[in-house]
Amino acid sequence: MVRSGLAKYPQAEHAYTQVLAVTPQGDESRAALVDNLAASIYKQGELANDAKDYRAAADHFLRIRTAAPTSSIRATAEYDAGGRANPHAGLEGGGGRA
């Protein structure tokens, strides 16, 4: 089940990128397309996080700021990236537990 999700989100990202390339800036559907692009990238980050690949998760979340900077989930993605880059932050001792 996860394997099929891994295959679909990059394809969705590619498709939204292509559609956005030909969608005029003033088009009323553009904001929703940008949000869907961001969601497809965010889902890739969630899957990486579930696989405990925190660096890859953070990288996916941070890609949203360049791929979909006007997305409504950009701030959430950037916040989540910070937590994934150092998943033990906030635990006693500052460096987490071994």
Image (cartoon, rainbow, N blue to C red):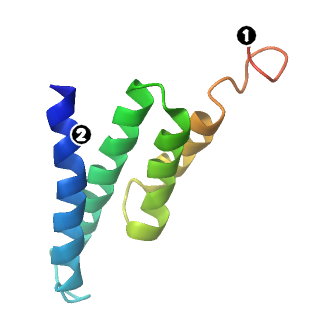
Residue hosting label 1: 98
Q: Is residue 4 left or right of residue 96?
A: left
Q: Residue at x 51, y 50 (%)?
A: 59
The answer to which of 92 and 10 lies nearer the viewer is 10
- In this picture, is 57 found above or below 51? below
Q: As displayed, is residue 38 above or below residue 52? A: below
Name the residue type under label 1: Ala
Quadrant in which residue 21 is drawn? bottom left
Residue at image point 49% right, 32% down: 53
On residue 6, the disc is: 2
Sequence-first disc among 1 and 2: 2
* Measured Cα–Cα span from mark 1 to mark 2: 30 Å
Q: Amino acid at mark 2?
A: Leu
**Residue at horizontal 33 percent and vertical 57 percent from the top:** 38
In this picture, residue 17 sits left or right of residue 69: left
Q: Residue furthest toward the right?
A: 93
